[in-house]
């Protein structure tokens, strides 16, 4: 979207993803959005990225809509139903309605030969002799006869491992053929620069990503995040519990203010914060400008050459008293 290579991308639909709290290097994401001709956002909340959209389609929350059947192939397979507990708020619409309406209006009605979610789900369930009424009578869950996954392979005299040898491979010849390390090789990580800490982030048992910080009951339990700092390191900086600081990373990106949590439960060269806070969205009346955003501070990342996975804990921050920022 930024370079136009190998071909230009001029349209984007973001469905259920908070672009500025999910992807590293937020300024780069904003530059990419500027290069689009059209950006449509589908979300349940007026999050930060919504203001950048040409069209916003407000979706009903999971308690207000039918979703696709949940089919799990566990040791004991089951099918579960999610149906609305209350009517959708205001003019929000469920995803199935949004997709069907877009399809019909684009002349693709042959792919949507059903009028309601109930009709669609009943058609799906008919293949195994079920319908919504029968599923509801079973508390919304239909258990299916099954067997352990490996039993299928034993019967077919095949290996469950998708490797050339059919075994667990500690030394991967396929990686060697691709000129990659056939065994994991330790690579030392860079140490924090003087005056900086490695930025670590993670989850809370209260919140889900950046989706729930505006929810009244959950916001009451945890209205903002804190920055965990080793108590000895905090004392050396003249900081104590409850002090507010700004976080500034190695590239000058800033976020906060955020409360200090001085604790012996973290090493002295790192700090930790819960992900999902630091929104810049006035529509989130409880979460707006509360705490700090770790995504804003992730201007650097390291890509794994095999999986393409992004390592984000390669950024460093320093703590600046909020009054001095």
Image (tube, rainbow, N blue to C red):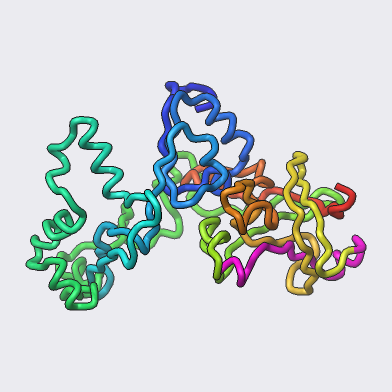
Compared to residue 212, the image places residue 78 above or below, namely: below
Residue in the picture at 23% in, 31% down: 106
Q: Quadrant of residue 76?
A: bottom left
Residue in the picture at 18% in, 34% down: 108
Q: Position of residue 151 (x, y in %)?
A: 21, 72
Q: Is residue 292 visible?
A: yes
Residue in the picture at 27% in, 47% down: 97
Q: Nearer the viewer, residue 90 or 211?
A: 90
Q: Nearer the viewer, residue 322 or 56?
A: 56
Compared to residue 5, the image places residue 205 above or below, namely: below
Q: Quadrant of residue 74?
A: bottom left
> On the rendered structure, is 193 left or right of 223?
right
Residue in the picture at 21% in, 62% down: 158
Q: Quadrant of residue 230?
A: bottom right
Q: Position of residue 26 (x, y in %)?
A: 61, 40
> On the rendered structure, is 5 left or right of 291?
left
Q: Nearer the viewer, residue 283 or 302?
A: 283
The span picked out in magenta is 218-238
Question: Is residue 207 within the magenta segment?
Answer: no
Question: Is residue 228 within the magenta segment?
Answer: yes
């Amino acid at each position: 979207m930024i370079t136009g290579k190998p071909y230009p991308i001029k349209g984007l639909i973001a469905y259920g993803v908070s672009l500025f709290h999910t992807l590293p290097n937020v300024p780069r994401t904003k530059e990419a959005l500027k290069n689009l001709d059209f950006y449509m956002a589908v979300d349940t909340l007026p999050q930060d990225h919504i203001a950048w959209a040409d069209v916003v389609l407000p979706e009903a929350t999971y308690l207000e809509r039918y979703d696709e059947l949940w089919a799990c192939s566990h040791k004991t397979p089951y099918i579960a139903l999610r149906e609305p507990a209350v009517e959708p708020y205001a003019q929000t619409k469920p995803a199935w309605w949004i997709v069907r309406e877009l399809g019909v209006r684009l002349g693709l009605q042959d792919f949507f030969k059903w009028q309601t979610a109930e009709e669609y789900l009943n058609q799906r369930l008919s293949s195994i002799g079920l319908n919504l009424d029968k599923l509801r009578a079973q508390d919304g869950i239909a258990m299916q006869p099954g067997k352990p996954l490996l039993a299928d392979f034993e019967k077919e005299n095949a290996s469950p491992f998708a490797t050339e040898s059919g075994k667990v491979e500690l030394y991967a010849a396929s990686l060697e053929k691709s000129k990659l390390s056939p065994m994991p090789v330790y690579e030392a990580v860079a140490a924090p620069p003087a005056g900086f800490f490695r930025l670590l982030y993670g989850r809370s048992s209260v919140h889900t990503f950046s989706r729930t910080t505006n929810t009244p009951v959950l916001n009451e339990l945890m209205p903002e995040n804190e920055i965990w700092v080793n108590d000895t390191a905090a004392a050396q900086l003249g900081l104590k519990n409850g002090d507010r600081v700004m976080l500034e990373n190695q590239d000058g990106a800033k976020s906060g203010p955020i409360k200090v949590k001085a604790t012996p439960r973290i090493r002295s060269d790192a700090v930790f914060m819960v992900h999902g806070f630091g929104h810049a969205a006035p529509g989130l009346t409880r979460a707006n400008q509360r705490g700090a955003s770790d995504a804003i501070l992730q201007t650097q990342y390291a890509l794994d050459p095999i999986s393409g996975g992004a390592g984000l804990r390669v950024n460093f921050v320093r703590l600046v008293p909020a009054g001095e920022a």
